[in-house]
Image (cartoon, rainbow, N blue to C red):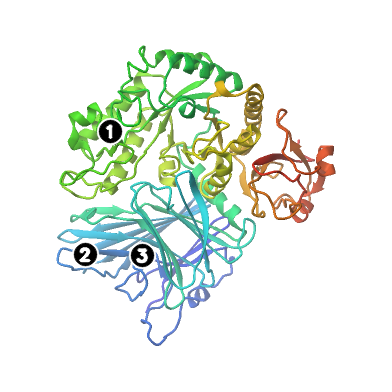
Amino acid sequence: MTAPRLERLVGPTTEVVVAVGPGPVAIAHWGEPLGPDADGAAVLAVHDVGVQPGLPLWRGPLPVVPEHGGGFDGRPGLVGSRGDGRDFAPRFEVTDARRHDAGGTSTLTVVATDPAAGLELRTELELDDTLRVRCILTNTGDDAYRLTELLMSLPVPDHVDELIAPGGRWGREMTPERHRWTSGTLVAQNRRGRTSHETSPFVIAVERGTGEWSGRAWATHLAWSGNHQWSAERTVDGRRQLQLGELLHAGEVVLAPGEAYATPELIASFSARGLTPMGWGLHRTARARATHAATPRPVTFNSWEAVYFDHDATRLAQLVELAAEVGVERFVLDDGWFGGRRDDTRGLGDWRVSPEAHPEGLAPLIDAVHAAGMRFGLWVEPEMVNPDSDLFRAHPDWALVDDRYQPVLHRHQLVLDLTRPEAYAHVHAALDRLLTDHAIDFLKWDMNRPHIHAADAHGRAGTHRQTLAVYALLDALRAAHPHVEIESCSSGGARVDHGILRRTDRVWASDSNDPLERQRIQRGTSLLVPLEMTGAHIGPRHTHTSGRVHDIGFRAITALFGHLGIEADLTEFDARELDVVRDTIALYREHRGLLHHGDLIRFDLDGPRSALGVYATDRTEALLGVAALDTSRHATTPPLLLPDLDPDRRYRVAPVHLPHVEPLVDLEPPAWWTAGSLVATGRQLGVHGVRLPDLRPAAAVLLRIVAEDRP
């Protein structure tokens, strides 16, 4: 067999070696740079397993789309056939490969064909801070090709035997779970029609013992907001692959002659130094999108947990006044402003201002918000409809349901079929009119129910086309109203992915504002999403999602590490709580340039503690939050190690005291804390760290670190 040509794509921390031809395009190496003198023959030799009894005669690196027809006995990347079962196992040969290098990004496009099966497979790879992969399958045959799966695979070394996959539920999203990866295949599938609370399209392969600052990590994420699947497979010959792609219902993609299907983009980040540096690549990729907001992220007030559906004008006016007084910069009116929406059972789809809730329209409230020096935002849920709505009564056929069955309600609502041109046009016109007629700067875009038997008028599965229609709607509105920012909310964090973030400005990480839960949620979300794109709000004293009661200091410090906001009835805050909110907003404004442009950092700590913060990219300053989540079995907790500072620089470490917050400590704090600061080299802080006060559960402290030679 002719040896493949090797293309070496080299980024700042990663190298990808691509084997091009004569068979399918394959990845021979994905990991640390090999150096200019690396020998290509040696790279290929690693993948030659020889001839083993009972194994197929398959040699070579792992294809991006593994082929059953080529002898790969693991999970194939392409599954499909023509009407009578033909062409179920294609075998591709490379016909064209082109490379382009510009601006620190290397791009390789490889075209492979199977004339017998009538298929063309185009593979696009880009490398800079992350590797991005996309495949496009075109039907070049004379009859329809029914696609079942088109999955993309990336190899990881044979010895890597642990996985980290964020899971969770409503109110506790993005909780990382570790799994042993021994033999066989671990599969996660999502059929909820959105990214979901439970199964993120995000999986990380790690060497055993890998932590935040040590060990190698290979992260893969599918930038897609609909159904998805990932698998981690160890084949019989010992090789390992991570495989991701869209999960297609039967018949969702049938390619007529000349038609093509493009996969969502697979984003991959490698780190030889642990999970925290691994996340920096994903964050830089998110920040590199064309629509990334260049302005400081405004402090946001959301009215939901303050008023729910009770839009009393006097109460809203009080909230506007208090929000402005404490330093809020954006006021968002949540659910209940439209149609007959006095509770969650009715009104969805009727996107006109309710004369009952707002007799004079939204203009008086918007004018008051602007007069107070704030911007105005509004909640919408355009993808849904209540059966008890004028829209549904007029167009019951617009719901994404199979009329042969009784529809399954969830949250008293159904999915609106945006793949129907008339339904799409109606929703687009309603939102466009809303944004044209009102001075709105922000939309909280919600999606409060999963897809359940989401079928179109012909009984065909509709999630794939619905997801594309939602993307198209967002793109169209952003193009017409470029000043309007959009938040992705889906019962909290059920739509958190880089696909939706290419069309929105932030995600709502969870409906839970309980700071104890938020410490975990925001830490898990930070693996994938940078802080400035993660909504984090100071909630009420009593959290309705958990029943817990928390001190204002813990609530405020937790919300500081994200896109800061408030979601509580400020009229119920006492004077001290309002002072803490005011001080926290002032601190956020002072440091949001650092918080939202620096390198996010996490720390390996014992179970009861959590720490999250940001280093300046030039390592001249940092801001950290350290929280106690529970009591410790030890009388004192270990020092906090501060890795990755400039080893030869001297740094001053100091507590940041919010004036009206007393840290809840069980013991007398260390002397340096009482004195106000300590000075040490970056090397010392990485080796010895700093001893912090021992905190009671549900308490947090802030640390400021500044280089002594910083101008």
Disc number placed over residue 81 in the picture, else none: 2
Label 1 residue SS:
loop
Residue 268 at x, y percent in the picture: 48, 56
Residue 531 at x, y percent in the picture: 56, 41
Q: Nearer the viewer, mark 1 or mark 3?
A: 1
Do residues under tags 2 and 1 come within 8 Å of each other at their CB atoms? no
Kindly identify which residue carries mark 3. 65
Residue sticking out furthest to the front: 547
The residue nearer to you, when weighing 211 against 43, is 211
Q: Nearer the viewer, mark 2 or mark 3?
A: 2
As drawn, is 394 to the left or to the right of 510? left
Q: Earlier in the sequence, mark 1 or mark 3?
A: 3
Crowd band around label 3 with a 10 angstrom C-alpha radius: few (<14), some (14–19), many (20+): many
Kindly identify which residue carries mark 1. 386
Label 3 residue SS:
loop
Q: Amino acid at mark 2?
A: Ser
